[in-house]
Amino acid sequence: MTKKNTKTILIDTDLGDDVDDAAAIIMALNSPELEIMGITTVYQNTYKRAEMVMDLCKQYGRTDIPIYAGYGTPLIERPVHEESPIQYEILNKGVHYNPKTDIDAVDFIIQSVRDNPELIIVAMGAMTNLGLAFHRAPEIMKNVQIIAMGGMFTSSAPEWNLLCDPEAARIVMDFSESLTMFGLDVTKYCLIQEELLDSLFSNKSERMMYYRNGIEIFKEKTGYPVTFHDVLLIAYLIDPSIVELKQSDFTIELSGTSTRGAIVFKVNAYEIHSKTDRNFRYATKMDEAKFRDLVIKRIS
């Protein structure tokens, strides 16, 4: 039973490549304001991603959370070679997990929404699983609250999560009645400097050293900086004042050499203050100090 004032969430994640998904899940696990009722994986080798989610949850003693491997292939693209996630070697050699298979991940999402009217879906990757859920059960899915990392709202450039499966994202945006997006133009300010990373690992706990190992693998293989894009979604659920939101109506472009996967506004551009009745919102600004303070308190 959900505790009073607790938000029940279902996380859909592509954990295993960038390091922000794991940090977001860690923050959620450490936050009494949130109850994780399940986790599904998306994009390419979802089975291995599910193994990694199970291994992470095990570090926090949460082997009770149902974890399902979702769909890895975009809705209309040709199948791609399912490479192992970048950080897959973090699993000890010979260690394997068995994600749940009683139903598939998409049906698990649909069932979870049906059984929990107040459920919030936290989408941290491509929207393949969600697009399929809306296709199978549009009447059940249409009212669920979704918060997602994806898109850019101050540029016509496509963003990775949406570009990985634009058709799935289009289905979600066409049929959803409650969607809040956190675009790259805001989440890029979630860059984590080395001094903040050092403070997170100061206590040298076993589980934080486990996470640090994943960060080192990521940095060695990609050379990219550590940016907690997906963590902003969890931070917002804990403290909504961290983010400023603007209501609008938007969709996703499905064609164009440079714009496939890009966000397109559907409001009247001739109006000074465009209005929409649709419950779509996107982040316009974040409080970096509040965000980093919450990171220090909840990622450990």
Image (cartoon, rainbow, N blue to C red):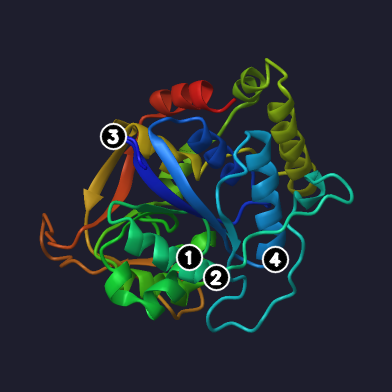
Question: Is the C-beta separation of discs 3 and 2 under 8 Å?
Answer: no
Q: Is residue 69 left or right of residue 90?
A: left
Which residue appears at 27% of the width and 74% of the height? 139
Q: Is residue 266 left or right of residue 164?
A: left
Foreground disc of the pair 4, 1: 1
| Disc 1/disc 2 C-alpha distance (Å) | 6 Å
Say whether disc 4 or disc 2 marks the residue closer to the N-terminus.
4
Between 135 and 169, the one lying in front of the other is 135
Question: Is the C-beta separation of discs 1 and 2 under 8 Å?
Answer: yes
Q: Secondary structure at mark 4?
A: loop
The residue indicated by pointer 1 is: 108
The residue indicated by pointer 3 is: 4
The disc labelled 3 sits on which kind of residue? Lys
The disc labelled 2 sits on which kind of residue? Ile
Q: Quadrant of the N terminus?
A: top left
The disc labelled 4 sits on which kind of residue? Asn
Which residue appears at 58% of the width and 71% of the height? 71
| Disc 4/disc 3 C-alpha distance (Å) | 37 Å
Foreground disc of the pair 4, 3: 3
Q: Quadrant of the C terminus?
A: top right
The residue indicated by pointer 4 is: 45
| Disc 4/disc 1 C-alpha distance (Å) | 19 Å
Q: Position of residue 109 (x, y in %)?
A: 44, 64
Residue 197 visible in the snapshot: yes
Q: Eyeballing the image, is 180 above or below 26? A: below
Q: Eyeballing the image, is 206 above or below 79? A: above
